């Protein structure tokens, strides 16, 4: 590997550029800056860049104070100027990789970023892709685009894939506590990438290639979507059989081996679980392989808001058009201010389609203006709660006054088992 770059990384004098300052890029940039690296954050979103430069964070995992300290120390800066990449020794790509239609990846953000980078890459630069993608992306897409610079990957510059493992809102596992997987184009690329991440992360695991690293990420998230889909199907099965699914899960958890608990709900949200496995599904289809588990799990999870809607109507005993419903929790995940692919939003959309009156309460989201929804979070007060025919407990945020809700609600459909162990005839669990 390049002795010059190796030494710069070891002494933390390497200049690190993070392209994409979202839920993955910003915490990563802060982690490197806190370990003494000079970090440049590049993002096309002018509002994000302005907030950082005004010492304000937009992600719960990064505090205003952390940003302020690092910027004042000269360790971190954010910009929309891609030309600043010419100063970088390391470039880490953390741009979004959504789906452009149901089962087709949208790699346009990645392609745009890489094409912009190609004009500024220098000899002995290390480029790492962290954005989740299908196996083969690093070698089939990133490598040829960067080589348009006239430099050769593995010889003139170094290229690797290292999947992000950020879990927004997880206070126990932040960037530095989560083991890293790295797979380089060559053994030299892998060693250099491992050396880089060892500066901020204790445990770094090498794999044989970028493809193996790309597949690792998709295996992790496909494992989750399949098991969430399975437990959502089990929940529906248990309802038909007259069995309490939550009791069954608690009983199964007592087995000390061979079982890992997953819990039913409205479906899956965020970026990783709803979309990442479908990258693998799409890639496998191109090789003539049909991943039945991924497709089935995705379909089951996508159907859960519909299933819960019909359960709610049956429990109320009257048409939804005549009902006034409050959805409690609108984010995709507990205690995280993130609306990406939130199944709670889908439930609100479905309720609105039924022409009934629907409101929401979420202490993290004061207003919701998305698609055909334009609502403000209600104030959680006794007289307000009493006015609804039913409350749907969609997300179990900490700090919500669940006792107030229980005292004053006429009926509660508890999708998240918030009232576990509470014997109350007006509370029905999923």
Image: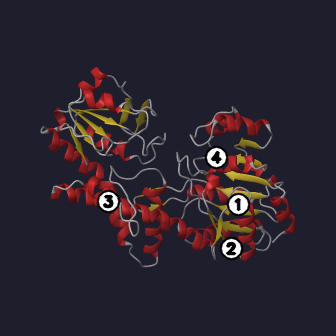
Work out whether mark 4 precedes mark 2 in sequence or the reverse, and give the earlier one.
4
Residue 3 in picture, x, y percent from top left: 86, 68
290 sits to left or right of 405: right
Dot 3: few (<14), some (14–19), or many (≥20) neighbours within 10 Å? Answer: many
Front position among marks 1 and 2? 1
Query: Which one is in front, 33 or 134?
Result: 33
Foreground of the two, 236 or 366: 236
Residue 185's disc number: 2
Q: Identify the image quadrant of residue 155.
A: bottom right
Q: Residues within 10 Å of mark 4 (few under 14, many from 20)?
A: many
The answer to whether marks 4 and 2 mark residues whose Cβ atoms lie closer than 8 Å is no
Q: Closer to the N terminus: mark 1 or mark 2?
A: 2
Q: Secondary structure at mark 3?
A: helix
Q: Position of residue 272 (x, y in %)?
A: 48, 56
Q: CA distance from mark 4 to mark 2?
A: 26 Å
Query: Which SS class for mark 2?
Result: loop
Element type at mark 4:
helix
User: For the point 74% across and 42% down, which residue is it?
Assistant: 77
The label shown at residue 21 is none
Q: Secondary structure at mark 1?
A: helix
- The residue that label 1 is drawn on is 197
- Residue 281 drawn above or below residue 366: below
Which residue matches tag 4? 26
Q: Nearer the viewer, mark 2 or mark 3?
A: 3
How far, Cα to Cα, is label 3 from label 1? 36 Å
Mark 1 or 4: the one toward you: 1
- Specify the color scheme: secondary structure
75 is higher (above) or lower (below) than 175: above
Residue at which label 3 appears: 231
Q: Are marks 1 and 2 in contact (CB under 8 Å)?
A: no
Residue 214 can be seen, yes or no: yes
């Amino acid at each position: 590997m390049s002795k010059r770059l190796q030494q710069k990384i070891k002494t933390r004098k390497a200049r690190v550029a993070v392209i994409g300052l979202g839920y993955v890029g910003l915490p990563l940039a802060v982690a490197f800056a806190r370990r003494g690296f000079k970090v440049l954050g590049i993002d096309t979103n002018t509002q994000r860049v302005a907030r950082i430069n005004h010492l304000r964070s937009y992600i719960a995992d990064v505090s205003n104070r952390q940003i302020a300290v690092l910027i004042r120390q000269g360790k971190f800066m954010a910009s929309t100027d891609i030309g600043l990449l010419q100063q970088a020794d390391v470039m880490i790509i953390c741009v979004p990789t959504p789906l452009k239609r149901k089962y087709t990846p949208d790699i346009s953000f990645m392609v745009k970023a890489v094409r912009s980078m190609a004009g500024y890459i220098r000899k002995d630069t290390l480029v790492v892709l962290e954005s989740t993608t299908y196996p083969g992306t690093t070698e089939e897409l990133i490598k040829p685009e960067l080589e348009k610079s006239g430099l050769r990957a593995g010889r003139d510059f170094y290229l690797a894939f290292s999947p992000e493992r950020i879990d927004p809102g997880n206070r126990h596992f932040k960037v530095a506590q989560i083991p890293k997987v790295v797979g380089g184009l060559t053994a030299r690329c892998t060693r250099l990438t491992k050396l880089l991440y060892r500066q901020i992360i204790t445990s770094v695991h090498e794999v044989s290639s970028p493809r193996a690293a790309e597949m690792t990420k998709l295996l992790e998230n496909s494992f989750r979507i399949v098991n969430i889909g399975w437990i959502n199907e089990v929940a529906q099965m248990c309802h038909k059989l007259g069995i309490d699914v939550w009791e069954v899960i608690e009983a199964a958890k007592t087995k000390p081996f061979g079982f890992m608990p997953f819990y039913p709900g409205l479906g899956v949200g965020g970026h990783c679980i709803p979309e990442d496995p479908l990258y693998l599904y799409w890639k496998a289809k191109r090789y003539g392989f049909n991943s039945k588990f991924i497709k089935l799990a995705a379909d089951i999870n996508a159907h859960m808001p519909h299933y819960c809607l019909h359960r709610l109507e049956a429990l109320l005993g009257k048409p939804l058009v005549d009902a006034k419903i409050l959805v409690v929790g609108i984010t995709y995940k507990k205690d995280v201010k993130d609306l990406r692919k939130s199944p709670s939003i889908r439930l609100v959309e479905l309720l609105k389609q039924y022409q009934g009156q629907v409101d929401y309460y979420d202490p993290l989201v004061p207003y919701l203006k998305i698609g055909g929804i334009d609502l403000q979070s209600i104030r959680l007060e006794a007289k307000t709660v009493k006015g609804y025919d039913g409350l749907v407990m969609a997300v179990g945020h900490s700090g919500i006054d669940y006792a107030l809700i229980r005292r004053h609600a006429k009926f509660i459909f508890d999708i998240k088992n918030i009232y576990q162990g509470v014997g109350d005839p007006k509370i029905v669990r999923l």
